[in-house]
Image (spheres, rainbow, N blue to C red):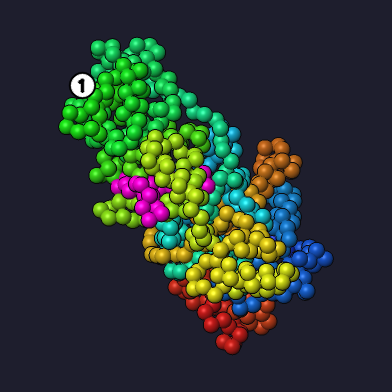
Amino acid sequence: MLLSGGMDSSTALAIAKAEGLELIALTVDYGQRHQREIEAARRIAKYFGVRDHRTVRLDLRPIGGSALTDSKVPVPEQRSLEEIGRGIPPSYVPARNSILLSYALGLAEATGADAIYIAANAIDYSIDGKAEVWVRTPRWTRLMRIDEFCDLPEGRYRTLALDRHSLQLGWSRVTGRFRHDTREKRCFSVRLERGQEITITEDHSLFTIDPATSEIVAIKGSIVREGTPIVVPFDLSKGADAWNREFRSFDIEGLLRYSRESSRTWSIVDEGSHFTNRLRRTRVPKRFPLTDEFLYLVGLWLAEGGKELDSRNTTLRFSVGGVPGAAEAMRSYFGECGANVTKSPANAIDYAISSSVFTALFGYFGLFGTSKNGEKAFPRFFWNLSQRQPRFVIAGLWDGDGSHVFKHQTTLNQKSHRLIQEMYHCLTIDGIFPIVKDAPHGQKMMVIGRAQDFQRFATLYPLKHVTKLQAYKWSGTIRGRDQATGLWKCPGLWTAVASASLLPGRKTHIYNYGSKYHSSFRAQRSAFSGVGSLRTLAESKLAFLRVVDVRETREDWMFDLSVEQAENFVANGILAHNSGYPDCRPEYYKAFQEVARLGTKRGVEGDIIQIRTPLIHMSKADIVRKGEELGVPWALTWSCYLGGANACGVCDSCQLRLKGFREAGLPDPLRYASPSRRPANP
């Protein structure tokens, strides 16, 4: 048991003791400032009756690089909880846990111990299971809910993340997927001005801009407020380069069984390689081809078709509206398969495809459902398609439901909210940045309004509605200031401009063009590309969107990812953060478990020493509750980095400890310095 004498390791020791284990406590004096924790470790070991307590000296001061071992690095004081949660803190000791675990591993092997307990505690970084993330493997790329991703088997997965140095988006390897019990945590639902939504825990962070430095920094859920600027990638196209593996066909071998379970009146006949009906008119291959024509018609069906799954009806009804060429496309496609296409005698826009085979097939693909009930959804094969193929589905959907240009915007309304939300992600990965907002009658509305978005949409999406297509192309030529993706104006922005070496008059141009004296929240980003210290930020594909609503909510379980060489990933279109000490993360201990298996005599002989981290997903409040339950004598523990006779109450460790006790609703019996040294709101 690695025992430091702090609240975390004391609780971990109490857990191991409660499990009835015989313990060897190992305390390491590595030259840390807070030597009092060595004495605290002795008191805790004695209190719990640990008979074998060993203290060793491994001086890490010559290495330096930490506020705890290097006298030249000051210990942070009176930092806000927001600041404490930003990135890796100065109190991180380089490779400390690797060194301590290596020593503990040697001791465990020498003494025959079965396991090493370490009180590592990762700062939580959790989002709700419904949040959608992009997932890529060597075989496919798709959007999926994070809870579904966490249930996938082991494999080589990548997701979209931001390089914090270059501010470029790209695919990064996922090194860990985790689920946390959050029934005791406060959770917040956050909605941004362009419609993005995400639910996070109180100690999970999103990203914002530091007003003083204009740098991208983390901000905890507990302090997100209305008006806070949150970082949102607005163009994923460069980092998420196209996946070109075309999904050419879909196996519909199960169609006959599906039709029998769904309806007795559908006449589906198995003809070996094809399905047909009793009259042998309609024929579709069991390896059903997903042609561009069929994908477009699926989109048109989602817009203007759809009905309840009715066993008494074997007719698909489309309403083509004013889409030129849509009727011909239907006649051509369905006619080649032997299905009869007829126009409604009542009007010129409704068409019917009379075919029990296609009716069953649309049901098999999950395409039934009405707009009225908000049940429409992309078909099951949609997320297996290449990046190019979904554009045909969306083109059909937009031809049927999308509006003409009005006041420099085009809109698409749907009661099927999931259609809108998933389409948003498809557009952003093509470099289009729409707005999603609530509309009347329970609908969600998608809005395209930026000139470059009109231009890309008209170029990438094969619309058949010629009038709409021409209007979108024309709207793409109208240039103006793109306020949606401007830089968030803050003092740090103008300080960087003022300190830059620029030609005479250039700074004045930037102040004017960047709207320094304008009351808007955002500055025109193109104005800052000539400022060296701001060029990376100005050329990034990151927008700063204001929070418009924060609501406290409850979630039983929350999820998170660990991403290689990144403290972030894109979830629900928002840049989500995962923070803390790098050697306190679950994937680190998973890797060290491999060290124990591969790097010891016992490990190669099959007697693997286990690395156990009982506190890894607990908050400080959870640790206090657990320690209280197991009788940890808090007054004997020591957490402070600075204190003399009493704990200081102002260092990061004291503040996190005080926060844990406060949120657990328990008093901390440890003695602290006078109130004058204490933070106003620890």
Q: Quadrant of residue 351?
A: top left
* Residue 217: image location, x then y, percent: 59, 64
Q: Residue at x 34, y 18 (%)?
A: 337
What is the secondary structure assignment of the residue under circle 1?
loop
In magenta stretch: residue 406: yes
* Residue 34: image location, x then y, percent: 70, 73
* Residue 226: image location, x then y, percent: 43, 69
Depth check, front residue: 456 or 295: 456
Quadrant of image for the N terminus: bottom right
User: Quick check: 359 left or right of 476?
Assistant: left
Q: Residue at x 78, y 66 (%)?
A: 64
Where is 480 relative to 257, above or below?
below
Q: Which residue is mark 1?
A: 265
In magenta stretch: residue 389: no
Quadrant of image for the C terminus: bottom right
Label 1 crowd bin: few (<14), some (14–19), many (20+), radius 10 Å = few
Residue at the right extreme, as displayed:
62
Q: Residue at x 46, y 44 (%)?
A: 473
Q: Which residues are magenta?
A: 403-431
* Residue 247: image location, x then y, percent: 49, 28
Where is 595 relative to 367, above or below?
below
User: Quick check: 101 left or right of 293?
Assistant: right
Residue at the left extreme, as displayed:
346
The three-letter amino acid code for the residue at tag 1 is: Thr
Q: Residue at x 31, y 55 (%)?
A: 439
